[in-house]
Each structure stands twice: as structure tokens, then as C-alpha cells.
Image (spheres, coloured by chain):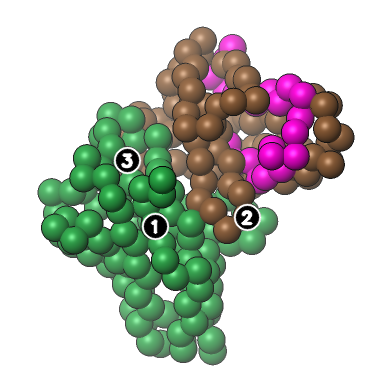
Chain colours: A brown, B green
Amino acid sequence: NAGVTQTPKFRILKIGQSMTLQCAQDMNHNYMYWYRQDPGMGLKLIYYSVGAGITDKGEVPNGYNVSRSTTEDFPLRLELAAPSQTSVYFCASSDTGTGSEKLFFGSGTQLSVL
Amino acid sequence: DQQVKQNSPSLSVQEGRISILNCDYTNSMFDYFLWYKKYPAEGPTFLISISSIKDKNEDGRFTVFLNKSAKHLSLHIVPSQPGDSAVYFCAATENYNQGGKLIFGQGTELSVKP
């Protein structure tokens, strides 16, 4: 089982460049999430989706955009990359979205903006 | 404003002994708490959770205790094994129906020495 797959694993961007972080899950989960983890900090929610066509902001959405055209895919778009966006990005999914349900995380994308 | 805090960045214990990881929170509206474990270059994986209506939940070697009056929870690992060496994140959610919108602590790196 692939679970949650993120690409790329590593990326270096120059200030002002744009890129899309890809995320795909094969578990037919309705709920998908993007988190970022800064050094020495916990994960912070960027955006989430409760199903295809429905997205909403999390705790730190500025500088990012998302779309959810299919159940499987939830790409995260960075426009005009800034050094503050240097972080490790994790995509996650869950089936029902309830508090007792565990999230399944991808292995992360390490992004550096120089 | 850090709503979930793990004040110990690291913890070292001997194999076979008990590991106790602590977590404090400030938001009295949190109603579900979870622990995730993370190995290097991997995404977090769910470990154990507890509802705010309980004060203890046990799963094999792992037990989570919740003290609502002190806004404190702890994870006990008994006996500790070298394979338990990882970063442990405490997380909380305010709304049971929005379980994926987690607030994470900074993490505690556990090292279990043989």
C-alpha cells in the first residue's frame, strides 16, 4: 500500500519563484491536510479539504493556495516563494475527519527558499 | 501563542526503564488529545489518543494519562526499547468533528540507550 505519497522529497527555490508540492493518497479518504514543520516547532495546519471541490484555510495559509479536483490529489501551490516558507511540508489524509481518527502522513517535502 | 507545549526538547532513558513524556495545554476547549511518533525522514505516525472524558488510555506498552484540571497529559512507555527512539508530538483538537485540525506541540526527542 502506497498510502500518502508526496513529491518532490527535496527542493531548493530562489526567492520569488513558484512551485507546486504534490500529494496523492490511495485510501479513498475524504479529508486531506497540509501541515508545515519549522525547526524545533510543532506542525502547523496550512490548508485542509473535506472532499473534492471543498477547501478551507488552516492556521497559517498566507502565501499558499490549494485545490482539490479529485479525491486522490491535494496539491499545494507556493506563489512568490519567501525565505519564511523554508520548512518541511507534510500532507496527510483521514477517512471521517473526527477527533478520534488518526491521520496518515506522507514522508514530507523539505523546501529551502534562498 | 503556543496552545500545546512540550517543554522538554529531549529525553534519554535506559532500555527497559520507563519513559515519561509530558505535554501541557492552555485551551480548555480541547476535547481530544493524540500522540504521534516521528522517525527521521518519515512522516508522523499515530501512536495513541485519549478523549477528554477519560483520564487514562492504554495500548500495550503505551499509556496516556490526562489531568484536565492541570491541563496536562503524559505518555508513559514501559518498558522502553531502542526502537522507541524518535520524536514524539503531542496534539489536540478543539472540535471532535474536525479531528484533522490538530494543534501540535514542539515535540520531544526520546533516545533509548541499550
Question: How many neighbours does mark 3 have within 10 angstroms: few (below 14), some (14-19), or many (20 or more)?
Answer: many
Task: State the SS at label 2.
Answer: loop
Quadrant occupied by the N terminus of chain A: top right
Viewer can see residue B47: no
Depth check, front residue: A79 or B34: A79
Q: Residue furthest front?
A: B1
Q: Chain of mark 1?
A: B
Q: Name the residue carrying label 1.
A: B5
Q: Chain of mark 3?
A: B
Viewer can see residue A110: yes
Residue A78: percent from left, percent from top: 71, 26
Left or right: residue A81 versus residue B113 is right
* Start-end of magenta stretch: A69-92
Q: Name the residue carrying label 3.
A: B93
User: Label 1 is placed on what type of residue?
Assistant: Lys
Disc 3/disc 2 C-alpha distance (Å): 22 Å
User: Label 3 is placed on what type of residue?
Assistant: Thr
Disc 3/disc 1 C-alpha distance (Å): 14 Å
Residue B112: percent from left, percent from top: 51, 81
Q: Is residue B108 magenta?
A: no
Q: Quadrant of residue A79?
A: top right
Question: How many neighbours does mark 1 have within 10 angstroms: few (below 14), some (14-19), or many (20 or more)?
Answer: many
Q: Quadrant of residue A10?
A: top right
Query: Residue at 54% of width from left, 43% of height from top?
Result: A105
* First reached walking from the N terminus: tag 3 or tag 1: 1
Query: Residue at 54% of width from left, 58% of height from top?
Result: B38
The reply to whether label 1 and label 2 mark residues of one chain is no
Question: How many neighbours does mark 2 have within 10 angstroms: few (below 14), some (14-19), or many (20 or more)?
Answer: few
Depth check, front residue: A82 or B64: A82
